Amino acid sequence: MSKANAESFLGSVNRNFDKAATYTELPKGILEQIKVCNAVYEMKFPVRIGDEIQVIHAFRAQHSHHRLPTKGGIRYNEHVDKEEVEALAALMTYKCAIVDVPFGGAKGGVKINPKLYSEYQLERITRRYTTELIRKNFIGPGIDVPAPDYGTGSREMAWIYDTYLSFRGGDIDAAGCVTGKPINQNGIRGRTEATGRGVYYGLRELCDTAEAMKRVGLPLGIAGKTVVIQGLGNVGSYTGSIMQLEGKARIIAVSEYEGAIYREEGIDFEELLRYRASNKGSIIGFPGTTALSSREAALELECDILVPAALENQITEENAPRVKAKIIGEAANGPVTSGAEEILLKKGVLIVPDMYLNAGGVTVSYFEWLKNLSHMRFGRMEKRFDSNTYSNFVGLIEKLTQQSIGEREREFLTRGADEIDLVRSGLEETMVTSFQQIWETFRQNPKIDGLRSAAFVTALDKISNDYANLGIFP
Ligand code: GLU
């Protein structure tokens, strides 16, 4: 993204904020304090790459200290700049408030194209970046807790954790300094799929809301809905798989860096992911599909749900008039600009905003952080106890009915919850509850123009309450 675009991303987030602020009665000063970015650390450090020394440019923005630690991913992308990181950090604050995750928002960025570096070089960059954060007290389980974002994953999180440990080995809660770690290094089951799974729960909830479906003239339920997905990174690939396997939605088009493909009857999404891996990273030529003229063309297809799951500023004032989707599910951060949103809202499109819809990642990060601080896996205490209780029930029913239950049913009915079951259940509960809160705000206030403003109002309400509790605001 060019600098001009990145600036307009921050501008877009702030314009959305200002619009939503008019629906609240909060004093100007408190709104200003919620809106501003509290602290940004911009750094330049040398790393040896091959025979030369390269100066790496990186950032960490902590948008809001009203709750600590601050929380948010670290992005590796050549277009990263200060405004982009600030915009993303602000979204994290609103996101955490909406899903009741008790953190302030933050975001980090390293201005590199990770594809141009070897694994060893990426490790050196990541470790040096972490050292810079430690030096300035910008990381720690009670200070600021990074996580994966675009261009990073559990591998980078493991390097961050290990670097932190080498400086703060005596900190018994050190594992809580970063989330999205590998499972065997104090990570949690279900974190990798969390954002995509959350997107699915959020869209399923919307499709199960009669009034919402009436507004867009679609039948109830996610099953059979036609879906277009932009981006096959972590978020897009889990969203597509889960929407198809669990939601029975029909994915008619997929767009990626190399182009876009279409199939009216639906694309076998899991098969497509395997094909791409074996086809030098390209979806083009996947059997049964036709290639579209450009990757952008997918965004303009007739469909029920369009899911942009790549980067910000994808739907702009330029292409918004040609978008034909009835629902846009923002799996990425900031894919629809504020100007585009105005056009889409006039057309009656329901936009499910990023700050709610992709909050599954930070929600499960919160569970991972809790696991790290409690030093115990979820389910360890109650799994056997629950299982024994269910067994006793089944035994009693068998005795009373004089009938015995089959082995498979017994297994199903008497199972105690594992970590993954609890994580998914907590995530589902979070996404469903938060959707209901946003929908109620939207429904009860006819002046509110869309779900993004409703989500903002919900967030502003919760954050201003926190300030009140801190005694800053009566
Ligand atoms: N990078 C993710 C996001 O934008 C996850 C952040 C986290 O888990 O802290 O929401």
Image (cartoon, rainbow, N blue to C red):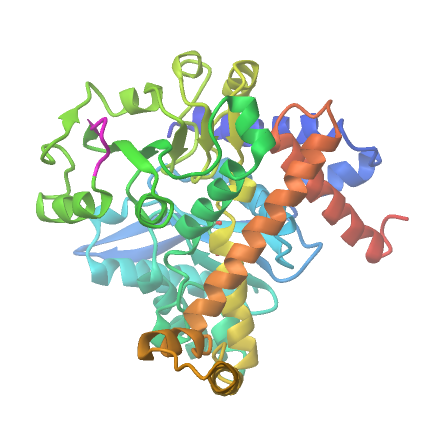
Foreground: 335 or 142? 335
| Up/down of 19 relative to 408, above or below | above
Does residue 445 appear in this view? yes
Picture residue at 42% right of the left edge, 51% below the top? 197
Instruction: Give the image location of residue 183, x and y in percent.
Output: 36, 72
Q: Is residue 276 left or right of residue 302?
A: left
* Number of numbered labels in the structure image: 0
Q: Is residue 25 left or right of residue 281?
A: right
Instruction: Give the image location of residue 9, x and y in percent.
Output: 50, 30
Magenta highlight on residue 265: yes
Report the residue that reaches farthest toward the right: 474
Instruction: Give the image location of residue 404, x and y in percent.
Output: 39, 82
Task: Give the magenta-colored segment's residue range.
Answer: 261-267
Foreground: 35 or 268? 268
Instruction: Give the image location of residue 300, x and y in percent.
Output: 34, 19
Q: Is residue 329 left or right of residue 120?
A: right
Q: Which secondary structure is most common in the magenta stretch?
A: loop
| Up/down of 462 relative to 327, above or below | below
Magenta highlight on residue 143: no
